[in-house]
Amino acid sequence: MRETPRKPFTGRSMAAVMVGGFAIVIAVNFYMASLAVGGFHGVVVENSYVASQKYNDWLAQAEASKALGWEAKLSRDETGHVLVQTIGAPEGAIVRAEMRRPIGEHAFASLSFTALGDGLYRSGEPVDEDRWTARVSVEAGSDIWAEESEL
């Protein structure tokens, strides 16, 4: 049996390996960067200096909200309407929610709710079947409770 001669590994072969390897690394980096930029929909605050000045007020509001002892649990019914079950909040409270999608397609929704009784509230409009982050607020007189939760 005769052995076929191998081609020698030359500088041209090494250059091809190097160019091919770097091309793969660069292509993966561009793909990952496009995914990262596509999932970010903008700034969290418009002006970070102004936000830093309001930070202590936000902390005080959060503490006052926590001191009320209220809770709210979100769910979705079969028609896509958001349901909020309040615990500890007085009957007749006003419930609102600001919804946003944390990932994927950029979307927002402002919802108002109708009381169904026993602390249960239903949104006036349905929302899409996707993951949402909801900033729920419950107001009763001068008391305001707010919290973010996932839906």
Image (cartoon, rainbow, N blue to C red):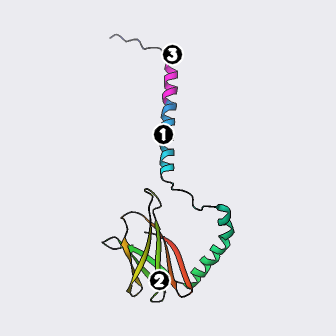
The N terminus, quarter of image: top left
Residue 140: which numbered mark, if any? none
Residue 28: which numbered mark, if any? 1
Q: Are marks 1 and 3 in contact (CB under 8 Å)?
A: no
95 and 11: which one is in front? 95
Residue of label 3: 10
Depth check, mark 3 against mark 2: the one in front is 2
Q: What stretch is highlighted in magenta?
A: 10-20
Mark 1 → mark 2, Cα distance in angstroms: 49 Å
Please tell me whether mark 1 sits on a helix, a strand or a loop.
helix
Please tell me whether mark 2 sits on a helix, a strand or a loop.
strand
114 and 134: which one is in front? 114
Q: How crowded is mark 2: few (under 14 residues within 10 Å), some or many (20 or more)?
A: some
Question: Could you tell whether 107 is left or right of 68 in the image?
Answer: left
Query: Magenta span has 5?
Result: no
Residue 94: which numbered mark, if any? 2
Q: What residue type is labelled 3?
A: Thr
Relative to 98, does residue 107 appear above or below in the rendering? Answer: above
Relative to 143, does residue 109 appear above or below in the rendering? Answer: above
Q: Are marks 3 and 2 in contact (CB under 8 Å)?
A: no
- State the residue at coordinates (52%, 31%): 22
Depth check, mark 1 against mark 3: the one in front is 1
Q: Which amino acid does label 2 sit on?
A: Ile
